[in-house]
Structures are given as structure tokens and as C-alpha cells.
Amino acid sequence: MGRRPHALLLPYPAQGHVLPLMELAHRMVSHGFTITFINTSFNHARLLSAMPTLTCNSTNLSINFISIPDGLQPGDDRNHIANLCKALTTIMPLHLEELIIKMMHEQPEHDKPTCLIADESMAWAFDVAKKTGLRTAAFWPASATTFTNMRNIPKLIQDGIIHEHDGSAKTPGVIFRLSHGIPPMNVDHLSWNCFFNPESNKVIFHYVYSNSESIKNAEFAVGNSFYEAEKPVFDYLNSSKILPIGPLLSGRRFGKPAGIFWAEDTTCKAWLDEQDVNSVIYVAFGSLAILDERQFQELALGLELTGRPFLWVVRPDITGKAIIDLPKGFKDRIGDRGMVVQWSPQQDVLAHPAVSCFMSHCGWNSTMEGVSSGVPFLCWPYFADQHLNQTYICDVWKTGLKMIPDENNMITKEQIRDKVEELLGDGEMKKRALAMKEIAIKGVEKGGSSFENFNTFVSAIKQEV
Ligand code: UDP
């Protein structure tokens, strides 16, 4: 029997990384690959509780699921990103190596792993792959700009933009360009400078820096973007080995949903069907952002004040507290005008004709999903790459407005109402969003740049070394 290409896929253990890599898995299956998807044990348990039909090593989706420990204790806080990053490099590499060696010894010849595709934030895994003779590719779920910043850490240090010891700005707030044509960036918006405190930023900077070295061992890098979205950055990279293949997750998504940590509340689709076309404000802040209690209450009052229909994702942990209190009488006053869910089928929601705009934390998946649905944004970034993504939406593509905290660090209910009105009253903004959607969709259709890049990538990585 001929040897079938068998890819091991290793996501960084967070929702926004697992979802797009799972989509890549589905696409590779359709190109004849066997996939082994390696989650952390903690996340594997979450996937099982959100989607009980997904069993360990199940092949019901033509994907085998395997899990290894992440290095933290069961009760540890996985949303403490600095602690998670420290843990990931302690015992996970050993478990990964053991797993690969076991598979190489025990699997029949025609089914042995042939390549490893690891998230850019798990690039340490390429050191393991090198030892075990697998072909390698990095996957970047964030923007190509974020990926490029990571690869350029030595240059940023050399050019005197960041400090070598912690990645912080030499001159806070300074605007720099990696090269002519690349949009100007604020040094404080480099992803490692946007975590919760200087100590976390420092740990994350060193994690990213070390991954940026290991990533050199990857033969290819593929990511969830498209050429026209970040043209100057792709021109700057000018590499046939760094290939945008996105948007991966959109209303036209290829794969079956899998890889979600919260069960989707699909009742919102029937609710959307009852709303007028282009009327609903969709509000969601991804999987990790935490709103402080005051801001959460103000957001509820702001949505009320708009007088418009809204669909609001209120994750069970959105305020970091066990119990979520909506403002007194809120539900009675809103009635059927608003719907609150814990987790939505977001790609379907954004593609629904009733949705008029997306109030978003600007995670890159959400950004690509909004773009590929032609929906304008109200940008409310929190951390990591979200400020940089906001810059793309508002300053480069001009398909959204910034929500700006006041002197008390609050986005007031009046600002929420006013920005919604400004955004929805701006026909040009909607036109630009629809134009971006056309470009994005063309790219993933037969003959489009992302489509061709994906084909180039799979045929190359299928070859035996
Ligand atoms: N998502 C979802 N339902 C929700 C909220 C988010 O399916 O109610 C998905 C969203 O479609 C996206 C991912 O979760 O694919 C979040 O990734 P993103 O990069 O936007 O943000 P992060 O969670 O990494 O901050």
C-alpha cells in the first residue's frame, strides 16, 4: 500500500489558535492527508464537553485526536498567558518527542507521520521535529504583520526600537516602519508589549523571541490572511515559503465545526432570521478578553441606548467573576430586541444578512471573519495583537471605527450609541467592507491567490524528504 501523507498538527492551546488550525486540518484531509491533531489534555477535555461526539483518537471527522500535558497543574489558570508560556516549554517538548517516536515505531509503514505543522507560538516543536526527521511547517493564525514583527525582533533591537532584555519600547509611543510601504506601527502595540503588566510582557517577549529562532527550522509558513489584506508586508517578506491561505474561517467555511471550547447556542440563528436585513449589532469579544464589571454594565446600557436589535455574546467568564449580573431590569426593558448567548456560531452569525456591524475586540480570527462577511467594525481592542489589528481595520482598510476610552478608562454608553449611529450612517464604510469581502472570497475560490498558495503548500509538504 502507498504511503499516505500524515500530518501532525500542534496548535497553541487557546481557542483562537485551535479553531483555524482545525480548519486547516479539514482542508488537508480533503487533499488526502491523515491528520493527528495534538491538543493539550486540558483543552481536549474542554472540546469533549462542548462536543461530546468527539472522542479521543476518533476518526469520525477523519482526524485523530491525541492529547499531551501542557505542563500546568489541573487547577492552574490557563488564561494567565505568561505562566502558560513558561509551562509549555518545560515538559511538553518531551511529551511531543515521546509521542512522535512512539508513532514512528508503532504505526504501520504506510501510516507513519510525515510532517509536523505547529503554530508559530509553538515553534519550539520544530527543534523536536528536526530530531525525528519530519518535514515542517509553521502556521500563523494571527496577521502576517504580527508574524513579521516576531521574525524581526533582532532588527527591532538593532534599530534601537525595543530593549533586548524585555522587548519594551526604547521610546514609548514611538511610531516606526519595518520598511517603506508597511503601515506605520506604534511600538507599544507590538503584541508582546500588550499583555497585562511589564512582568508578563517580559516573559511573553522571551517566549516569542525564542520561538522566532526555532521557527527558522520550519520549511514553510502558512497563515490565516490574504495577499491584498497585508500586501506591503507580503511584498517585504518576498518569500515563496511564506504563504497566506486565508481567510480560513468564514461564512463559507469548508470544514465541519470542531475545536470549540464552549457549546454553541444555535438558537440565535432563528432569532436572526426574524430580524430586518442589516439591522443587528453583533457584539463579541473572543475567547479571552475580560471586561471589568463597570465596563460590562456600561456596555449593556449602551446597547440598550442604541434602540437597535443586538446579539451579544456574554461568555460565562467575561467579567472574570462566577456570576454575571446584567443591569437591573435590563432583560425586561430589552425584551425581544436583544439576544444574549454564551457562545455563538460566529462565522454563521457574521454571514447572516441581518447583521449590520460587529463590535469586536479585534482578535485576528474575528477580524478575518468580519472581513470575509463584509461587515464594518466597531473596534474595542484589549491586548496582544488586537491594537495592531484595529490599526488595519480603521486606518488601512478603513472599514471600522475606534471605540476610545475616556479619562476614566471607560467607553461610555453615549459613545456606544454615537459610534453605532456614525458607523451605520456611513455608506462608504459599508461599501469598502463589501469590497474587501469580494477580494477575500475571490482569494479562496479556485484560481485565487490563497487557493493557489494552499495547493502549492500541500503538494510540497506531501513529498517525502
Ligand atoms: N467565536 C465563536 N463564538 C463566539 C465568540 C467567538 O465561535 O461566541 C470564535 C470566533 O469565530 C473566532 C474565535 O472564536 O474564530 C476567537 O478568535 P479571535 O482570534 O477572534 O480572538 P481570541 O479568542 O483569540 O481573543
Image (spheres, rainbow, N blue to C red):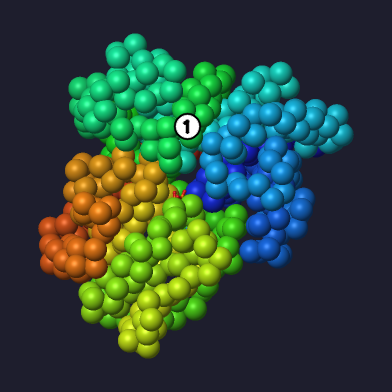
- The residue located at (47%, 32%) in the rendering is 199
* Residue 56: image location, x then y, percent: 76, 53
Near-viewer residue (36 or 426): 426
Q: Where does the C terminus fall, quadrant-wise?
A: top right
Q: Residue 407 vs residue 289: left or right?
A: left
Q: Residue 245 vs residue 46: left or right?
A: left
Near-viewer residue (312 or 405): 405
Q: Mark 1 points at which residue?
A: 199
Q: Residue 98 vs residue 443: left or right?
A: right
Q: Where does the N terminus fall, quadrant-wise?
A: top right
* Residue 368: image location, x then y, percent: 37, 50
> In the image, what residue type sits under mark 1?
Glu
Farthest residue toward the right? 106
- Whether residue 278 appears in this view of the structure is yes
Farthest residue toward the front? 408
* Residue 421: image location, x then y, percent: 16, 68
- The residue located at (50%, 49%) in the rendering is 16
